[in-house]
Structures are given as C-alpha cells and as structure tokens.
Image (tube, rainbow, N blue to C red):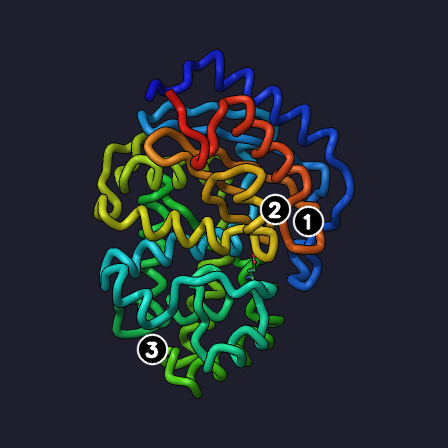
Amino acid sequence: MTAPLPEAIKTALEAGQKAGLAATGGKNADYIPFLASVPSNLFGIAVVTADGRVFKTGDADYQFAIESISKVFTLALVIDQIGPNALREKVGADPTGLPFNSVMALELHGGKPLSPLVNAGAIATASLVPGKDAEACWAAILDCQSRFAGRKIALSNDVNTSEQTTNFHNRAIAWLLYSSGSCYSDPMRAVDVYTRQCSTLVSAADLATMGATLANGGVNPVTGERVIGDDKTAPILAEMTMEGLYTASGDWAFTVGLPGKSGVGGGILAVVPGELAIASFSPPLDPAGNSVRGMAAVTAVAKSLGRNLYRPRS
Ligand code: GLU
C-alpha cells in the first residue's frame, strides 16, 4: 500500500473544504452552556499521516472542547493498563443503538454500559483509571491526551465549570452504574474525572495527530513516542466503528467505512489504520450530535483519497 502523496492530500483537503462549506444546517450544542457561545462559522480540517506529515486548512488550529472524543483516549489509557479482555468484561464491546446519554440502554442491559464510547461506558472507563484519588486519575488522563497530541493539552476552566454545574444527568448515570456494580471507583469521583476529560481544548490538527498515533500502532508519528502498546489500537478502532458517531455509527460505517469519533464540541476524527487520520471542527450539530460540516468534510477527504476500510486497495 502506498501512502498518499502530498498533492493527493492537498487535493483531498480542498474537496473536504468545498463539501463542508456546502453542508448547511445544524445547531451548536446548548445543553452545555459554553458550547452555545462558540462561533458557529468556524471550520477547519487536518490530516496527519502515520509517517508524521501534517496538512491543514481553515480553522484547523482553533482550540475547542474535545468532549466525547476524549472517551477514545481514556479508553486507550485503560486498555493499555488492564488489557482489552478486562475492559470488555467490565464495560463491554457492543453498540447500544441508543443515544449517547441513554439511561434506557443501561436498564436494558442489566446496568452494563456495553460501549466505552457512550457516557455510561465512558464514566465506567474513567472509574478504571488507576490512581489513589481524583487528582491522580486526572493527571494520568491529561498526560495521556498530551502524549497522543504531542503537546501539553490543558483544561479549559470555562468549559469545565459550564459542565460541572450542569452535569446532573451524568451524575444520575454514575449512580445507576454504581448500583449495578459497573462503576469501579466512587461514582462522583468518576463523573468529576470524566467531566474534566471532556473539558480540555484541542484543535483539529491536534485531533488528527492523536488519530495518527492510533493509525501508527500507538506511536505518535510526530514526536516518535510510543504512547500505548501496538496490540491495543485494534480494539480501540473497533469500538470507534461500533459507537463513534452516536446513533449514526452504522450509517457512517456504511458510507465512509472508517473508524471515527465525534464530540458535541463539533470535532470529528476518522482513522485509516496504518496510514493517516483526518479531523475536522465545525460546531453546528445534526440531531444525532455529529457536526454537519465535519461529517461532509471528512467524508469528502476520505473519498478523495480513496480510503475505506472495507474496500480492497492495490
Ligand atoms: N461532556 C459531554 C457529556 O457528557 C460529552 C458528550 C459528547 O460529546 O457526546 O454530555
């Protein structure tokens, strides 16, 4: 397999920008008050290759709230520590078919979250981060996000305050998890750590580097640092395929064919294993919670590059 040439990536980014700008509609998330205040017209795309080349366009350096995309990297931290089998047994490895914050999904499955990429599973995953207290767990998560990104990632106090003062639904989920034996630390500590992990700031270029680290078997291709074991990336990418784009994950696999993850901050990340990652940022979301422009842009970039996991390439 030949890695795409710079000209092909530049052409793909142009196609992504055109498709993204043509995609209208959607609305910023507003259940977290901070997110409603982010300018809706921001739009950027980045591609980082598994050999460390960085390409970007538009607002690819604008820093926004990572939100749900953080779930992938806390999952990476925990899978690296306890192994995929323990993670599967304690949290699960199946799509829920229900919205990301569904309580019904928990009730239907005996209190087991099924996926580490929905809120219940992400809170359970955060409860598995080793550390003697919330601060130690938080330090490990922030360090993990930073090593994936290849730079020091920071918490936004504004985003964190906005979330910590409105996250009552997630607290209820954590108590339900605890009552069914699926929360492995104090539940309010798990929600606190989970909420902080969602409140860090990243750019599309950061996300693409984080994804390129997954594409590159766990080694950050820009810094050269091994972040997780090379046998750990496949189960993470499988989880992204099953639940990465909320209730549209099946549609995304059908139409784009790449493991992806989106967040209500407007970010989307897609990974071509062994080759590269594509990331986009644009705040307006569709009813499922995915960035309207971001989905159009990432789809167009992947198509222009001819990358789809399910299509044989010569
Ligand atoms: N912090 C958000 C929440 O827990 C993240 C949701 C998301 O991006 O899907 O509701």
| Distance (Cα) linking label 1 and label 3 | 32 Å
**Residue 308, label in figure:** none
| Distance (Cα) linking label 2 and label 3 | 30 Å
Q: Return the x and y of residue 46 as percentages of the image width and height.
A: 51, 30
Name the residue located 68 percent from the left edge and 47 percent from the top edge. Answer: 38
Q: Secondary structure at mark 3?
A: loop
Q: Return the x and y of residue 169 as percentages of the image width and height.
A: 59, 75
**Circles 1 and 2: CB distance less than 8 Å?**
yes
Label 1 sits on residue: 285
Res 70 quadrant in image: bottom left
10 Å crowding of disc 2: few (<14), some (14-19), many (20+): many
Closer to the chain start, of discs 2 and 3, is 3
10 Å crowding of disc 3: few (<14), some (14-19), many (20+): some
Mark 1 CB within 8 Å of ligand 1: no
Residue 121 visible within the image? yes
Disc 1 residue type (three-letter) = Leu
Quadrant the N terminus occupies:
top left
**Residue 184, label in figure:** 3
10 Å crowding of disc 1: few (<14), some (14-19), many (20+): many
Closer to the chain start, of discs 1 and 2, is 2
Quadrant the C terminus occupies:
top left
* Horizontal side of residue 305 vs 218, given as left or right: right
